[in-house]
Structures are given as structure tokens and as C-alpha cells.
Image (tube, helix red, strand yellow):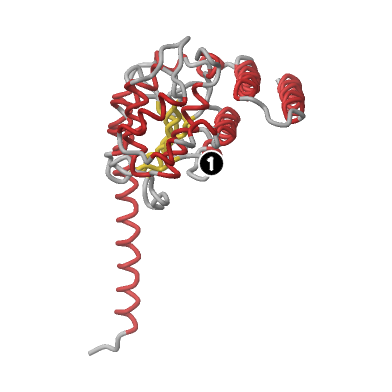
């Protein structure tokens, strides 16, 4: 298996060098590069006994099935092109250290992502003690008629986050409501009309056609692939993945994880306070 991995890495590296030689790769060329990387990862996963899981069969498993993915801790952080959202859908300045980080990977043209984003993701945002970090990625650019919708929509999400962060949640909601069918697309102008309809300023919308965050989407997609994300939607709570027959079934387990972490923090604080009081009592002179 190591030989196969090495060969795949060499193939992907060669592909990256070829693309790097192009001064300004188009969105379609970026999408092709990501498809090569994604196919390489899935091909290598198919050589191990859990290959079926890597190909997305996990959705047939009853209830929820958590598993640890160490690489997610490195790739799925707010600093890796993720957008931490508050309960109201606005972008947070930072992720509170004491919360459970719920990393959510979504592709704008993925139908299952639309269902998840419309109903489950807002529930995750509402969990006390959890912070949802959205990772727009572009696994499925090729499913759109122009071969670039996922990248362009992901870039638009980041553009809204940068220029009108209070509107990100609402913009995501509209993207799910108006998601193009596979084999079709939305133009940059249509994406801009959606954003403008919820109050995103004109100067922000005017930058959509520049695709300023296309490279960021490519980076996030490659990082997700390298970390083992092989399908969307994908959900990780503090680095542990959760999949289910029904995505509704992951909400309560993640809520329990957040509650348990909060209890652990409260217990730690109580322990520190008790130790301090004990030291103070020991240092006090006897009456």
C-alpha cells in the first residue's frame, strides 16, 4: 500500500507542477486539479479494509457512528479557511477556547448539503457550548454546467464573510434554497442578486466576479482531502467524525459532547478553587 501511496503522491505532485506553470489557472483548471487530487485519495482509500467507508457508505450505518480522524485537528481549524459562526449566523472574530469545535464541510452544489445546511446546521449552531465552523469546499465543481459553481459560490461566501460578516448565515440559507440542479449553475450576477436581497452591500457584491477567494477554496478542498474528508456533508466535533442514516441523529450526541466538555471545565474550575481555598486555609494562622 505504501508503494501505491507513493505513486499517487508523485502523480498529484506532477499535476500540481503542471498547473503551477500556468500563470493564471482558470476556475475550470483549478476544478480539474482538485478532481485529480480527490480521485487519488479515494483510490488509495479503496486499498484498505475501510475503503467502503471512505467512499461514503457510512450513511447506511444505523444511528450515529463516531470515529477519530487525527488529521482533522490540523486541517479543520478556523485558521484553515473555515468560518466560525455564531448562533445568529454572523462570523465570529475567534473560536472560544472552552467550546466544542464543530467543523462542517459543505459543497455548494451538493444536494445532501442543501438539506443539511437548511435544517441541521442551524441546530448545531444553537447548541450551548459548541461553535460551528463552516468549511466551503469544492469537491463537485464538475457537476455544474460551467464546471466552477462550487468554487465561485464558495468564494462568494468568503466575500460576504469579509465584507458583511453578519449576513453569512442568511446568505448560506439562500444558497441552499436556490441551489442549482446538477448540470446547471448560477451566474455570479445571480449569486450577487441573492446576496443583495438580504442587505449585503453593493461594493461587496460587486467583487463576486473577481473570485478573490477561489484559491482559498482550492486550499480548503485540498486540506480536507488530505485530512480524510471524502464526502459532503461531513461533520467533526473536536476532531471526531459523526455520520448517520439521518443527520438529525448527530445533533443530540454532539450536544452531549458539548455538555460534557462544559461539565469538565466546571469541574476543573471547582478543583482549582478548592485547592486555592485549601492553601489559603493552611496559610492562615490558627485562632
Which residue in the structure is indicated by mark 1?
80
The outermost residue toward the top is 183
Residue 221 visible from this viewpoint: yes
The quarter holding residue 175 reads: top left
Q: Would residue 242 appear left or right of 249 to someone viewing this image?
A: right
- Name the residue nearer the viewer: 227 or 153: 153
Residue 50 visible from this viewpoint: no
- Judge whether 177 appears above or below 280 on screen: above
- Judge whether 11 appears above or below 162 on screen: above
The quarter holding residue 83 reads: top left
Residue 62 point in image, percent of width and height: 35, 16
Q: Would residue 254 appear left or right of 69 to someone viewing this image?
A: left
- Name the residue nearer the viewer: 124 or 153: 153
Residue 258 point in image, percent of width and height: 32, 42
Residue 34 point in image, percent of width and height: 61, 23
Location of the C terminus (image quadrant): bottom left
- Judge whether 19 appears above or below 70 on screen: above
- Name the residue nearer the viewer: 73 or 256: 73
- Name the residue nearer the viewer: 92 or 205: 205
Dot 1, crowdedness within 10 Å: few (<14), some or many (≥20)?
some
Q: Residue at x 29, y 44 (%)?
A: 259
Residue 4 point in image, percent of width and height: 73, 19
Counting the numbered discs, the total is 1
**Element class at badge 1:** loop
Q: Residue at x 35, y 28 (%)?
A: 194
The outermost residue toward the left is 287
Location of the N terminus (image quadrant): top right
Q: Residue at x 34, y 39 (%)?
A: 167
Q: Residue at x 44, y 30 (%)?
A: 241
The quarter holding residue 48 reads: top right
Amino acid at each position: 500500500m505504501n508503494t501505491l501511496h507513493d505513486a499517487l503522491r508523485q502523480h498529484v505532485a506532477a499535476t500540481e507542477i503542471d498547473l503551477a506553470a500556468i500563470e493564471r489557472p482558470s476556475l475550470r483548471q483549478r476544478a480539474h486539479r482538485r478532481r485529480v487530487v480527490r480521485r487519488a485519495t479515494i483510490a488509495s482509500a479503496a486499498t484498505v479494509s475501510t475503503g467502503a467507508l471512505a467512499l461514503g457508505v457510512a450513511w447506511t450505518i444505523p444511528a450515529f457512528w463516531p470515529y477519530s480522524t487525527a488529521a482533522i485537528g490540523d486541517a479543520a481549524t478556523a485558521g484553515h479557511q473555515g468560518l466560525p459562526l455564531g448562533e445568529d449566523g454572523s462570523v465570529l472574530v475567534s473560536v472560544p477556547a472552552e467550546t466544542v469545535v464543530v467543523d462542517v464541510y459543505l459543497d455548494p452544489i451538493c444536494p445532501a448539503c442543501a438539506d443539511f445546511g437548511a435544517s441541521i446546521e442551524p441546530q448545531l449552531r444553537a447548541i450551548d457550548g459548541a461553535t460551528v465552523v463552516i468549511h466551503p469546499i469544492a469537491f463537485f465543481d464538475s457537476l455544474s454546467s460551467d464546471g466552477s459553481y462550487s468554487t465561485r459560490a464558495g468564494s462568494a461566501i468568503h466575500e460576504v464573510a469579509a465584507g458583511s460578516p453578519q449576513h453569512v448565515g442568511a446568505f448560506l440559507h439562500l444558497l441552499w434554497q436556490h441551489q442549482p440542479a446538477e448540470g446547471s449553475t448560477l451566474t455570479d450576477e445571480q449569486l450577487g442578486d441573492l446576496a443583495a436581497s438580504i442587505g449585503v452591500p453593493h461594493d461587496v457584491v460587486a467583487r463576486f466576479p473577481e473570485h478573490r477567494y477561489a484559491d482559498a477554496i482550492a486550499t480548503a478542498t485540498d486540506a480536507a482531502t488530505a485530512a480524510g474528508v471524502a464526502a459532503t456533508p461531513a461533520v467533526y466535533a473536536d476532531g471526531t467524525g459523526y455520520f448517520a442514516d439521518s443527520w438529525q441523529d448527530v445533533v443530540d450526541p454532539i450536544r452531549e459532547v458539548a455538555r460534557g466538555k462544559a461539565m469538565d471545565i466546571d469541574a476543573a474550575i471547582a478543583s482549582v478553587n478548592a485547592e486555592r481555598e485549601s492553601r489559603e486555609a493552611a496559610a492562615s494562622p490558627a485562632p
